[in-house]
Image (cartoon, rainbow, N blue to C red):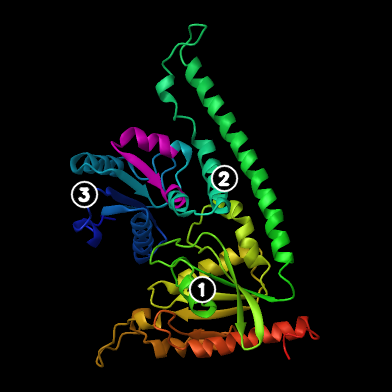
């Protein structure tokens, strides 16, 4: 498959101070090219969030990525030549690279390389604000680094050790570094265990109130919705992973109080290191009584994002929770109207919002609503529905509680 030779829209106006990057992806034989393009769009958004300007994309169709250099030798040489000619700062790969792939690619590239996991970790590290979030991200970062340490000390391999043999000092430096990182991982895990216990105590002390958790793909509007219904000021921004720390607010609808939590957004290929280190954050989801699954209806691949969140919920043990589906951003929804004389079958791009409401979404067993948190469209209906669901859970669990008088 030929690479996209056109520059991305962001590249023309990119400030000089920003790093410039090329994006690289392998399109599997059984993969739809449109899906591959969507993955690269998301990778570009990740780069944008990390303040890196994407200037070109390289793709290659292969049965599977090369175990040695991810792409083919010719494609790797082409990417390296382009990076030298255009003085590119970083090459970003759309999959997680193995340690051996990383070393082999670094030998061929004239610039820094990142994989998708490293890029997500860098974003998390830059956006972590509290000591809790920083501890979680540091743990994930060290666990990512540990198997990739060999090769980081190659500048020492030519030094002679005390016995006169080559490589002694460099090898000892690698082992020392591994030991330091293992010790830091152990310390961070101990710190997180203490935090886990503190968070568990906090959750147990919240009294007899129903817990509602906002979940969804990253950048679908969870924090905006949180601000709207809790009347608080949770940080919201049109970038990926604007929210890392779980925010819990007490909300009162009429005479019924409940706890509403805003959680970190999910994403395709979410690094396993992050899932493990964000265990306490995800406990808010696991222990919730009701999940409000927010979906960006204006996104071209919202159905796939919905499936990613469902699968992630299954993976963390929250797949059996009652769910209220919220299709957000109806004000930004667009579609391509078919001509009257066009007899070809309608595609997803040709469906209007009314068509979607009449489709499988409306026929599904899960309750749902279409709204816009930004434009405050259909918010009263959302509040009414949420009140009814919380009231039903509350009345079933605490039939003699005096909240409902």
Marks 3/2: CA–CA distance: 33 Å
Quadrant where the image shows the N terminus? bottom left
Q: Where residue 265 appears, x then y in whole percent?
A: 50, 64
Along the polypeptide, which appears first: circle 3 or circle 1? 3
Instruction: Tell me the distance, in whole angstroms, between the alpha carbons under discs 1 and 2.
Output: 30 Å
Specify the label residue 232 is tagged with. 1
**Other residues around mark 3 within 10 Å, as few (<14) / some (14–19) / many (≥20):** few
Q: Are marks 1 and 2 in contact (CB under 8 Å)?
A: no
Magenta stretch bounds: 101-121
Mark 1, other Cα within 10 Å: few <14 / some 14–19 / many ≥20: some
Kindly identify the residue that appears in the image at 74 percent across and 75 percent down: 208
Q: Quarter of the image holding residue 28? A: bottom left
Q: Which is nearer the eye, 83 or 14?
A: 14
- Left or right relative to 340: residue 290: right
Q: State the residue position of label 3.
A: 16
**Other-residue count near label 2 (Cα within 10 Å), few / some / many at <14 / 14–19 / ≥20:** many
Q: Which mark is residue 139?
A: 2
The quarter in which the C terminus is drawn is: bottom right
Q: Is residue 236 above or below residue 24?
A: below
Magenta part, dominant SS? helix
Q: Residue at x 28, y 54 (%)?
A: 54
The image position of residue 44, as x and y in percent, is: 34, 58
Position of 360 compared to 286: left or right? left
């Amino acid at each position: 498959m030929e690479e996209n030779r056109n520059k991305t829209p962001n590249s023309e106006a990119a400030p000089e101070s920003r790093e410039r990057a090329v994006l690289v992806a392998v399109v599997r034989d059984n993969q739809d090219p449109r899906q591959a393009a969507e993955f690269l769009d998301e990778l570009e958004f990740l780069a944008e969030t990390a303040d890196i300007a994407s200037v070109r994309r390289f793709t290659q169709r292969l049965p599977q990525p090369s175990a040695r250099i991810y792409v083919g030798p010719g494609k790797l040489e082409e990417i390296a030549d382009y990076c030298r000619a255009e003085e590119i700062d970083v090459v970003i790969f759309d999959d997680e690279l193995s340690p051996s792939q990383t070393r082999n690619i670094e030998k061929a590239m004239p610039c820094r390389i990142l994989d998708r996991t490293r890029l997500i970790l860098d974003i998390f590290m830059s956006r972590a604000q509290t000591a809790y979030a920083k501890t979680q991200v540091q743990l994930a970062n060290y666990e990512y680094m540990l198997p990739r340490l060999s090769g980081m000390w190659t500048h020492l391999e030519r030094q002679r050790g005390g016995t006169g043999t080559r490589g002694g000092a460099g090898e000892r430096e690698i082992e020392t570094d591994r030991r330091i990182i293992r010790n830091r991982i152990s310390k961070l895990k101990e710190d997180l265990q203490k935090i886990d216990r503190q968070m568990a105590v906090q959750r147990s002390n919240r009294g007899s109130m129903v817990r509602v958790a906002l979940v969804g793909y990253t950048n679908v509007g969870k924090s905006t919705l949180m601000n709207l219904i809790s009347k608080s000021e949770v940080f919201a921004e049109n970038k990926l992973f604007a929210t890392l720390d779980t925010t819990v607010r007490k909300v009162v609808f009429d005479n019924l109080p409940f706890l509403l939590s805003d959680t970190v957004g999910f994403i395709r290929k979410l690094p396993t290191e992050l899932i493990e280190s964000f265990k306490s954050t995800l406990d808010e989801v696991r222990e919730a009584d009701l999940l409000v699954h927010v979906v960006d209806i204006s996104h071209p691949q919202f159905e796939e994002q919905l499936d990613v969140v469902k699968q992630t919920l299954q993976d963390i043990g929250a797949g059996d929770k009652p769910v209220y589906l919220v299709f957000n951003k109806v004000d930004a929804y667009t579609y391509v109207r078919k001509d009257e004389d066009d007899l070809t079958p309608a595609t997803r791009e040709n469906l209007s919002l009314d068509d979607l409401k009449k489709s499988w979404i409306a026929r599904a067993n899960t309750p749902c609503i279409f709204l816009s948190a930004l434009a405050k469209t259909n918010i009263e209906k959302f509040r009414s529905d949420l009140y009814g669901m919380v009231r039903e859970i509350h009345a079933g669990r605490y039939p003699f509680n005096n909240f409902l008088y």
